[in-house]
Amino acid sequence: MSFVDFNVRPTVKFDVANPDHRRWLGEFTRTRRWGDCPVRFSTAGNGNTLAQMQLKLLEYYINQEFSKA
């Protein structure tokens, strides 16, 4: 096995309801690096994974804010 095989981060589907996923995306947004994130993210569909994750996060917080009566 190569060095790369031992250091590949597992790929997980981005789940906006998971607080760890939100925290890791928030850290990336602040630092512009994935260095501290222990996983790689995937999303449904094609296109820019980061943009899709940011859209899901925006929708999550909008629903949190505006679902209050």
Image (cartoon, helix red, strand yellow):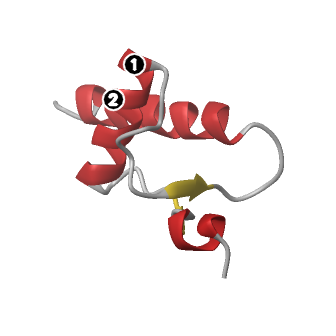
Q: Which residue is mark 1?
A: 31
**Label 1: which secondary element:** helix
Q: Does residue 52 lie above or below 6 as drawn? A: above
Q: Secondary structure at mark 2?
A: helix
Quadrant for the N terminus in the image: bottom right
Q: Residues within 10 Å of mark 2 (few under 14, many from 20)?
A: some
Q: Residue at x 41, y 36 (%)?
A: 25
Residue at 60% across / 67% down in the picture? 3
Instruction: Give me the C-alpha separation between circle 2 and circle 1.
Output: 6 Å
Viewer-side residue, 24 vs 15: 24
Outermost residue on the front side: it is 2
Tell me if I can see residue 10 in this picture: no
Circle on res. 27: 2
The three-letter code of the residue at mark 1 reads: Thr
Q: How many marks?
A: 2
Residue 31 appears in which quarter of the rendering? top left
**Residue located 39% across and 56% down the image:** 38
